[in-house]
Image (tube, rainbow, N blue to C red):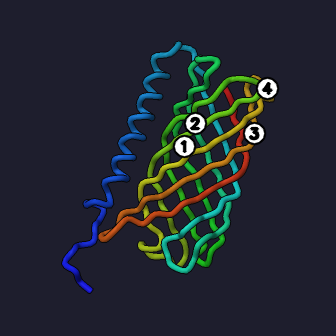
Amino acid sequence: MDNGLASPGWGDGMATAPRRAGRRVVALLGTLVVASCVGPAHAEVTARLGADATLLINPVEPGTETAPGLGITGLVGYSPELEPLILVPEIGGSFHWFDDRYGRMLTRAVAGARLGVAAAVEPSLSLHLGYARTWGHDVDAVLAPDGFTLDTIVACDFRLERWLSLGPQIGYLTVLAPTDRDTHTFHVVSLGAGVTGWF
């Protein structure tokens, strides 16, 4: 029944909160990058590769609540010498496959930063934002939207060598995909391991 009220779209009220959150995240990441750039000149290049078991939560299409899957993430960055802190501005991407009836796949390009503590055991927190694209067989643009993506990863690495660390990680990511009428959102949680090289 038409009550004379238009449904909010991406350009209306529903977009306010995501856009405000996006601006705050960008400001935070920018602050971290600037802080690292004004640090000591010596820096190490880092490359991190992670592999995870994943769970897709609340897919766009009705009637499907979860779907298991696998994911792989690659990130490259640099770490100024700020001991005992680890601050790594980084860029990279990820690929995810989900075992649902559509064979859904998700690829992402992201940029962000990782903050941690340099020790024999190195806890860290990463935050990235970027663009995500979803596809699969028999999936149209409504069921496989593209859009803004945000993720966070908590890791606990063990320094095996000066140039190598390895440890478990847990993560969460979301995709916000605007359409003509509203914003579709889905979420992915992950559990796996990551290995980092320091060069």
**Which of the marked residues, 3 or 1, is nearer the chain's N terminus?**
1
**Which of the marked residues, 2 or 1, is nearer the chain's N terminus?**
2
Residue type, mark 2 in image: Val
**Which of the marked residues, 4 or 2, is nearer the chain's N terminus?**
2
Residue occupying image coordinates x 45% and y 76%: 140
Q: Which residue is mark 1?
A: 92
Tag 4: Cα neighbours inside 10 Å, few (<14), some, or many (≥20)? few
Q: Secondary structure at mark 2?
A: strand
Residue type, mark 1 in image: Gly
Task: State the separation of the CA atoms marked 3 and 4.
Answer: 13 Å
Q: Secondary structure at mark 3?
A: strand
Please identify the quadrant where the N terminus is shown: bottom left
Q: Which is more foreground, mark 3 or mark 4?
A: 3
Q: 80 or 26, which lies in front?
A: 26
With respect to residue 82, does 177 lie above or below?
A: below
Q: Which residue is mark 4?
A: 161
